[in-house]
Amino acid sequence: MLKTEHICVNFGGIKALVDVNINVKPGNIVALIGPNGAGKTTLFNVITGFITKYSGKVFFKNENISYKPPNVIYQKGISRTFQNLKIINEVTIKDNLILGLLKKKIKKYYFKNFFRFDKKFRKEIEQTLDYTLELFGISEWKDKTPDEAPYGVLKYLELARSYLSSPALLLLDEPAAGLNNFEKEKMIELIKKLKNEGITILMVEHDMNFISSLADKVYCLNFGKIIAEGSYIEIRNNPEVLKAYLGDEDA
Ligand code: ATP
């Protein structure tokens, strides 16, 4: 589903990514771990086109998508969520979801005709939104604005918005961050649901319990390099990974 070859990114003198090769199989959930500043978000930004100054190649479903801009990559079937939520605070939770439909359902009307949809079309959109709100367990918040909702609801909202764009590959940047244990359990169930629908997932995450519940494979980055790859158990016991997280002596 996704392959990167020899990705290198430099920010001034900082080598954020050094010869990064990853391979994500269709239908898998793959986790990307590593200490702060290891390069995880940078790799997400390369894959999704937010960074285009890099060397190396990115393949999505065997197509070379290197250096393409985010809108093109999104159209091809890659969606993402963000470490810092990207939500419109001035509109309701339900209206925030509409953005997820822009790719397919309402592309040709786009914003210009947004308020001129015919009744039948509006109804169809309403139904899709209501179904999705229900699926992600956030129906009761639909008429609230984001600042009136708990953080967990906003994380589910971002996930729901990505889901609505029918991605083949979904990139989740720290889906468990900021959630309490109850909310994390719900997030795990939601991600499993997406996997069951055939969506391939690559996620950056720090929470090891969360990863152990979901990941088919784990990559560990440190100082921009992949230092280990394997199953959760293999990674958990890998001395290089322990050293990267805990330092030499503690490891
Ligand atoms: P975290 O877990 O803290 O989110 P990360 O693994 O996602 O960290 P990145 O955000 O990818 O790490 O950062 C990798 C390195 O690149 C860091 O040294 C960071 O300071 C640097 N970096 C990231 N983005 C930029 C930028 N736009 N300009 C300059 N340096 C950057």
Image: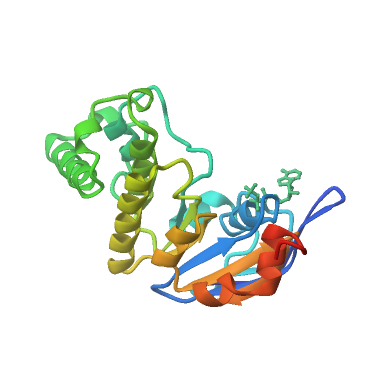
Q: Quadrant of residue 101?
A: top left
For the residue pair 92 and 60, the one nearer the viewer reads as 92
Query: What count of labels does the image hold?
Result: 0
Drawn side of residue 162 relative to residue 178, left or right: left
Please report the residue visible at 13 percent of the width from the left and 39 percent of the height from the top: 123
Q: Residue 64: percent from the left, percent from the top?
A: 59, 70
For the residue pair 164 and 219, the one nearer the viewer reads as 219
Please report the residue visible at 70 percent of the width from the left and 71 percent of the height from the top: 240
- State the scheme by which the image is colored: rainbow
Residue at the right extreme of this rendering: 13
Q: Quadrant of residue 167?
A: bottom left
For the residue pair 133 and 249, the one nearer the viewer reads as 249
Q: Residue 98: percent from the left, percent from the top?
A: 31, 39
Q: Quadrant of residue 150?
A: top left
Q: Is residue 110 visible?
A: no
Drawn side of residue 58 relative to residue 75, left or right: right
Q: Considering only vertical position in the picture, is 15 above or below 90?
A: below
Q: Residue 100: percent from the left, percent from the top?
A: 35, 45
Please state, as top left, top right, bottom left or bottom right, where the C terminus lies in the image.
bottom right
Residue at the front extreme of this rendering: 250
Q: Considering only vertical position in the picture, is 138 above or below 7?
A: above
Q: Residue 38: percent from the left, percent from the top?
A: 70, 56
For the residue pair 116 and 125, the one nearer the viewer reads as 125
Drawn side of residue 247 relative to residue 173, left or right: right
Q: Is residue 168 visible?
A: yes
